[in-house]
Amino acid sequence: MVLTSINEQEGKLNIHFELVELKFVSHTIIEKERYDALKQIKSGLSLYEKLFNFTSPKLDTEVWREELVQYFIEKSSYKPDQIYLLKKLQHINLSDITVTMSGSADVYCYTSNLTESSFQRIDEGIYLEKIDSQTDNFIYTRSFILKQLQTNEQITPDYEELDEGYLIDIPTGIIDDEESGDIVSKDSGVQVKDENFGKTKQESVKEPDKAQDEEPDKEPRNVIPKVISSPSCYPEQAALEGVSVTYEDTKEDNEELKILI
């Protein structure tokens, strides 16, 4: 996401591009995801510096200025009182345009408050790591997210309790793993007791091979049941229950701007 702002100062135009990368992650992968976000920000800043470096004009600099103006017009990303800025951006000398850039990796951690983190705490539930002069890494914790949703963090989801003997009533036969669990064999890492352990060599030889006497398709298997319990309501769901979102159409008629430019 790129936030663009244009303002006029002493007859010159100042353009600022702010690149924002959003992440909504669990605390178990927060380090991996935030480094990925910072990598994306670095790549984006490098590209924008190459395209919109108006202080050192190149052969395609004029083309990218026209593309920028056209983008604003097509997306209607301006207010009526800002039309004159777009007109000035199209006709002003390139030497009178100043471009600045910044990047922000905004990481939202929905599973933890990160109380043991070493990041700088700037507000309740908000941490900051200053990467360099252009890039910041903001980290928002679970408490901040729930506060914005206007719900209580102490509310916990309810889980259905299993009946007594639930695990006892499960048949010992072969069960489809997609419905009831994963079939565990000797190759799965489950330790199996060696019946010949502690016996002499002669005693172990006399023992009949039970595996050969049994039919292959009737080999006993251990089954680990898969228990899935669905919570009735999470705090995030309770906060948004009954909320309807409406979007206001703010698209302005840009025919006048197209004629004037």
Image: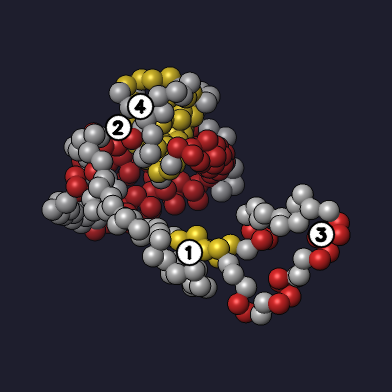
Identify the residue shown where x is 49% and y is 29%: 135
Q: Which mark is residue 181?
A: 1
> Mark 2: which amino acid?
Ser
Report how far apart the C-alphas of labels 1 and 3 lie in the structure. Answer: 38 Å
Earlier residue among tags 1 and 2: 2
**Side of 195 where 62 appears, left or right:** left
Identify the residue shown where x is 36% and y is 60%: 166
Spot occupied by residue 94 in the image (x, y as percentages of width and height) = 47, 37
> Mark 3: which amino acid?
Glu
Earlier residue among tags 4 and 1: 4
Q: Are marks 4 and 2 in contact (CB under 8 Å)?
A: no
> Mark 4: which amino acid?
Ile
Identify the residue shown where x is 76% and y is 70%: 208
Give the residue number, with chain letter if any, for mark 4: 126
Helix, strand or loop under label 4: strand
Q: Nearer the viewer, residue 101 or 260?
A: 101
Q: How is the image coloured?
A: secondary structure
The number of numbered discs placed on residues in the rendered structure image is 4
Q: Are marks 1 and 2 in contact (CB under 8 Å)?
A: no
Earlier residue among tags 3 and 4: 4
Helix, strand or loop under label 1: strand
Q: In front of the other: label 2 or label 3?
A: 3
Q: Which mark is residue 55?
A: none
Report how far apart the C-alphas of labels 2 and 3 lie in the structure. Answer: 65 Å
Count residues near mark 4 (Cα–Cα under 10 Å), then give few for <14, some for 14-19, many for 20+. Answer: many
Give the residue number, with chain letter if any, for mark 2: 143
Earlier residue among tags 4 and 2: 4
**Side of 156 where 3 appears, left or right:** right
Give the residue number, with chain letter if any, for mark 3: 203
